[in-house]
Amino acid sequence: MPKFAASLALALIVSLPVKAGASEMIADGAFAKGQDGFWAAGGVALARERGKLCVDIEAGGNAWDRLLGVNDLQFQPGTSYRLTMMLEAGDAHTFAITIQRNAEPWTPQAAFDAKTKAGKVEFSAVFTATEKDPAQIVFQLGGSEKPWRVCLDDVAMRETKPDKTAAAAQKTMYALPALVNQTGYFLDGPKRATLLSEANRPLPFKLEDGNGVAVGEGMTAPAGFDPTVGANSQIADFSAFATAGEGYRLVVGEKKSLPFSVGHDVYGKLRVDALSWFYPQRSGIEIKGDIAGEAYARPPGHVQQSPNQGDTKVTCLTGKVAAKLYGKDWTCDYTLDVSGGWYDAGDQGKYVVNGGIAVSQLLSTFERGLVYGDGASPVLSDSLSRIPENGNGIPDILDEARWELEFLMKMMVPDGQPLAGMVHHKVHDTKWTGVPMLPHLDPELRALHRPSTAATLNLAAVAAQGARLFAPYDREFAQRLLAAGQKAWLAAAANPVLFAPDSDGLQGGGDYGDTDTSDETYWAAAELFITTGEARYLTALKSSPHWAGPVFPAAGAFDWRSVAGLGRLDLALYGDNLGKDDKAMVMASVVAAARNFISLQAKEPFGQIYKPANNRYDWGSNQLILQNMIVVSAGYDLTGELPLLNGVRESIDYIFGRNAMNTSYVTGYGSVFARNQHSRWYAHQADNTLPNPPVGTLAGGPNSTLVDDVARAKLKGCAPQTCYIDDIMAWGTNEMTINWNAPLVYIASFLADAR
């Protein structure tokens, strides 16, 4: 029976040791004697002022680049402690406070979020110590756009009674079995599982086959306290196992993991399902049951047939709401046919900036298969997905992209009108509809919203990208795309600061506001330059603040609001008309970002490529993980470095069940998967005559900001990774959207093809 060696990469946080007094846990926490032991590092300056410790923090950096701390605290394992202090600041900030070992490997025991506001605020948190080695408190203060200051007073650490809520949550975590990728592992790739356990020592584990026969064994490696789950973690590494099969389970003590396969093609099927998901999201077309499945058949939505009031003759928003959002000077006297496109998410709105990144990533999936797939990638096939255009001589993924591209061009302001060439930001109902509501039954009035610079540049980018990819298949359409992209580029240049405002709930759709379009300008210039090679676009690129600056945030990921990463990736992968030095610079930046993500991944007990600021999971955290994986996949395409490929292979484990919810976030994949994503027409939970979301639907995932009533009622106090519930009305954690499924298509295609 093979034995698997334990392995674990551990975090490194540099500290400056200062001895704390023996008589108090926090020496001179009132800062009255000048004898405190606090230290600072990385752009943080300390000043003792009138019985306070005042901390001046430089702008920028990651959270962990600006540090404050105190060392040599002695805790008793199993004992609970309360950390308290008074914080005083000039404005609102959120930062992480970590309790961790005082020396390598800096093992964490607990982590908390602290928040300041203008004035004073009390901080209090309870944790249970897990080890007796000398510990330190570390404040992670970096990442602010501007320099800021916070003053501390009355800092104290005392023994206390356990926090019952946290203890109960931790007990739930420790009851979980080993957490695995429920769909399966590559035969020649990393195979790791995460265990949450009170034990600080390595634990024995067994690998059993589908018949319950032990086929391998090993020892876990303790990975310390994970603040994203509020529990201690261990890693079981069985990467050496290389026998293909199904029904494997990892056994630790009496607990067995959910089953998984080894060596079977999972991601080829996922590529088909995730791409086919877009067809029933289409607006303006009958969804046929013999293609999408009978449960998903429906009449066309929003083709101006009662009770619909759109989308073939839609005028601009008017009245008090329009005046409040856009001022009294904006209106229009024309109507547009904006039928078609994809419904954005679980509602029936259509938003250009979300459609832009989604269609771009489908186009990028095709382009990657074309350039890096040795001409053999199934993504080039005309029979890949379940759509009515099968067999028309055009690759299916381009057919699907065209459905959105045609809509985006329809959103352009006509010639002869004010703002001609600009693109309307969005079209949706003027009032929110309820759940359930099939698209063809939506009775609400539809309206166009004011054009925006961001929407216009989105069209410029994706139209240029589409033009080069459609050229071999439909030259006329490719030319129309390029003309639209160049027209939008000029219109945006003439109207560079037309931003979409926040609505404060005044409308029946999402905002998608953005007041910085430098990234959209960079992205559009990149796509136009790759497609045309024209010097004017290279000039725009080189004058952009994003030309040589960082575009891949280590904390979080790029998204629809921050799209410079899309331009950088395409320049690195396809920018062959760049000069030699420029191409080398761009490629090097992508490879460096990919390697940095791998170094951050090595510190995550769940193996995901995601390190959000202050450990707070963002809205759509699952797709943010996928976006970071795309950066790493590009690094692999550019270098062929196996650690980069394996990093992507391991990070996908989180999506398919190696997470604190023990849940696959893709419908139809794994033994336990999300099935009630927020939708008005895949609404089985609300109406059992309607279907659940289609196979291949990605759920948004944990969101530390509880924005809906279900989350507020059921997830209060949740550890970041557990801020998720599979409920149709939990739209803050369980939404589905086009810009989340698009990167899933990209990564599924990469994993299916890359060798």
Image (cartoon, grey):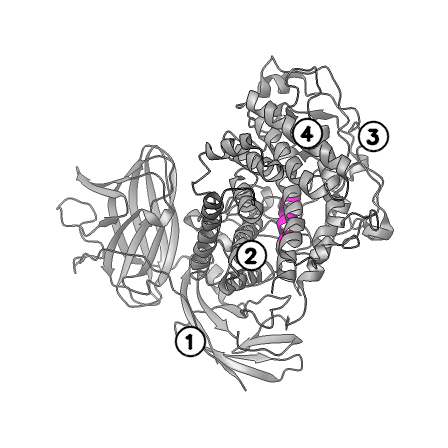
> What residue is pinned by disc 3?
307
Q: How many neighbours does mark 2 have within 10 angstroms: few (below 14), some (14-19), or many (20 or more)?
A: many
N-terminal label among 1 and 2: 1
Asked if one can make out residue 424 in the rendered structure from this viewpoint, the answer is no
Q: Is residue 417 above or below residue 587?
A: above
- Residue type indicated by callout 2: Asp
Q: Answer whether labels 3 and 2 touch (C-beta < 8 Å).
A: no
Residue at mark 4 to residue at mark 3: CA–CA distance: 33 Å
Disc 1 marks which residue? 202
Q: Secondary structure at mark 3?
A: loop
Q: Classify mark 3: residues with Cα within 10 Å, few (<14), some (14-19) or many (20+).
A: some
N-terminal-most mark, 4 or 1: 1
Secondary element at image label 4: helix
Visible residue check, residue 403: yes
Quarter of the picture containing the N terminus is bottom right
> Sequence-wise, which precedes: disc 3 or disc 1?
1
Query: Which of the marked residues, 4 or 3, is nearer the chain's N terminus?
Result: 3
Q: Which residues are magenta?
A: 736-746
Q: Amino acid at mark 4?
A: Ala
Res. 484 mark: 4
Marks 3 and 1, how far apart at CA: 63 Å
Label 1 element class? loop
What residue appears at the point 53 percent right and 64 percent down from the top-left corner? Answer: 646
Residue matched to label 2: 637
Residue sticking out furthest to the top: 329
Q: Mark 1: few, some, or many residues within 10 Å (few <14, many ≥20)?
A: some
Magenta portion: prevailing SS class: helix
